[in-house]
Image (cartoon, grey):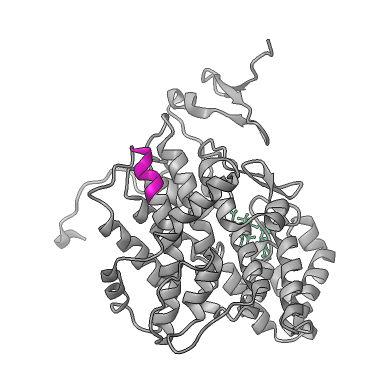
Amino acid sequence: MEKKRIATLSFNDGTPSVELPILSGTLGPDVIDIRNLAKTGMFTYDPGYLSTASCNSGITYIDGEAGHLYYRGYPIEQLAEKAGFLEVSHLLLYGDLPTQQKKEEFERKIKYRTMVHDQLMTFYKGFRRDAHPMAVMVGVVGALSAFYHDSLDINNPEHREISALRLIAKVPTIAAMCYKYNIGHPFMYPNNELGYVENFLHMMFATPCEPYHANPKLVRALERIFILHADHEQNASTSTVRLAGSSGANPFACVAAGIAALWGPAHGGANEAVLKMLDEIGDISQIPKFVARAKDRNDPFRLMGFGHRVYKNMDPRAKVMRETCYEVLTELGLQNDKMFEMAMELERIALQDEYFIERKLYPNVDFYSGIVLRALKVPLNMFTVIFAIARTIGWISQWNEMISDSERKIGRPRQLYLGQKRRDFVPISER
Ligand code: SDX
C-alpha cells in the first residue's frame, strides 16, 4: 500500500505543527490539501491564486511547462484538426466524443434552440448603437435569466442540460444581433439548414436583400478558433462563473458574469488589444522600440498576446492559430498582410530577447487570433465576443461539473486585513 504523502507545516514560535495531506490528480502537479489549516486560525495568502487550486475538475488539463492542452484527455491539436465544434462541445459537456447517432442528436438539440424569445430583441434598444458589443452581451445574456428562471431547478440534471443547450444555441444568435445592432442592420434569424458556425456567419454577414454563402475554408477556420477557445481549466472568467454559480445563482446570470470577466484586456480582451498594439506599432521598423517599452518596468506598455499565467512554453493554441492565420490569408490572397508580417517579426524578436526568455513569455492564443478574425471581416470590437461564443461551452460545462459535485460549497475566500483597528465614532463637530 503506497504510503500517503503528508506535508507538515511547522512554526518557529512553538505553535504546534499541522499535518496536511498531499493529493495527486490523474495528471499534473500534486496539491497540498490545506482544509485542516482552519484549526490553526490562520489562512493561506495567495492574491491572484498563483499557487492555489480552487477545485477539482476532469474537464481540461494544461501542462504549462510542456505546452500541452487536453480536453477530456484529447490533445487540442488533434481536436482542432479532426473534430467539429459541436463534437468538441459534446466532449466537454458529457465527457466523451459522440457516436454518429449522438452527434446528430446533439446537433438537433442545439439547432432547434437557436432562436431567441422575440421580446429579447427589445433589450438591444436600451443600448447606444455604438455601445461596445461586450457590454451588450453582458446585458442580453444576463437577461436570459429573466426568461428561464422560475422553471429552472439547478439540482435537476435535465434542467442543467437544457440550460447548457440553450446557451450553446443562443449565444451565437445574441452575438450576431449585437453586431447587427451596432451597425444598424436588421437582425438575421438563424437558418437551421446551416451548420453551427456557418449559421453564425450567416447571422453576422447576411442581409434580407440577397443570398449569402460563407467560404467553406473560412467557416472551417472560424470553427477551429471556436475549438481552440472552448475551455481552459480555471482561468479568470471560468473561475468567475464557478464562484457565481457556487451560490446557486441562475446559470444564465453566471455566464453573463463570465462574459464580464472575459472582457478585460489581460484576459479575453487581449485579441482586440493585440490588433490595437500592432496598429500603434505601425511598422516593422518600430518593433524594437516597442519591445524596449514592454521591458521597461516604468512603462505600463506590455506586449499584448504575450505571456500566460500557466504556459511557460508556447501556448499550443497559438501554434495552431499561426497556421490558421497563414491558411486564411493565403485563401484570401493576403499572404503579404502587413499585420501578419509584423506579428511574426515581433514573435521572432521577442523570442530571442533575454527579458522574454528569462520570464518564459511566449505568444498566447490571442496573439494571432485577431489577425485571423480581421481577415474574416469580423470587426475589432467583436473579437472578444467571438471568444465568448466559444468559451460558453467551457463555462457551462465547468458550472455543470461544479453543481453536480456533492462536495459543492459556496466560494468564500478570506483576507489579510490591513485596515484600521477598532475605533469609536467621532461626532462631526469634533472631526
Ligand atoms: C488569456 O488564464 C487563462 O487560461 C487565460 C486564457 C484562456 O484561454 O482563458 O489563456 C486566455 O487570457 C490569454 C492571456 C491574454 N492576455 C494577454 O495577452 C495580455 C498580456 N499578457 C500579460 O498581461 C500577462 O502575461 C498575463 C496577464 C497573461 C499573465 O500575467 P501573470 O501571470 O500575472 O504574470 P505577471 O504579470 O506577474 O508577469 C510576470 C513577469 C512580470 O515582469 P517582472 O515583474 O518579473 O519583471 O512578466 C512580465 C511582467 O511584467 N510580463 C510581461 C508580459 N506579460 C508578463 N512583460 C511584457 N509584456 C507582457 N505581455
Placement of 284 over or under 158, stated as above or below: below
Placement of 30 over or under 352, stated as above or below: above
The secondary structure making up most of the magenta span is helix
Q: Give coordinates of residue 378: x percent, y percent.
A: 56, 78
Residue 331 in which image quadrant? bottom right
Q: Give coordinates of residue 306: x percent, y percent.
A: 69, 64
Report the front residue among 416 and 104: 104
Report the front residue among 115 and 15: 115
- Image quadrant in which the N terminus is located: top right
Residue 399 in which image quadrant? top left
Report the front residue among 243 and 75: 75
Placement of 296 over or under 283, stated as above or below: above
Asked if residue 159 lies in the magenta stretch, the reply is yes
Q: Give coordinates of residue 65: x percent, y percent.
A: 74, 46
Residue 231 seen from this side: no
Report the residue that reaches farthest toward the right.
Answer: 352
Q: Give coordinates of residue 389: x percent, y percent.
A: 50, 63
Placement of 99 over or under 128, stated as above or below: above
Report the residue that reaches farthest toward the top.
Answer: 1
Which residue: 77% across, 79% down? 330
Q: Which residues are magenta?
A: 156-162
- Image quadrant in which the C terminus is located: bottom left
In screen coordinates, is 148 left or right of 260?
Answer: left
Which residue: 55% across, 66% down? 197
Which quarter is ligand 1 in? bottom right
Asked if residue 79 lies in the magenta stretch, the reply is no
Which residue: 60% across, 70% down? 271
Residue 109 seen from this side: yes
In screen coordinates, is 10 left or right of 347?
Answer: left
In screen coordinates, is 338 left or right of 423?
Answer: right
Report the front residue among 217 and 1: 217
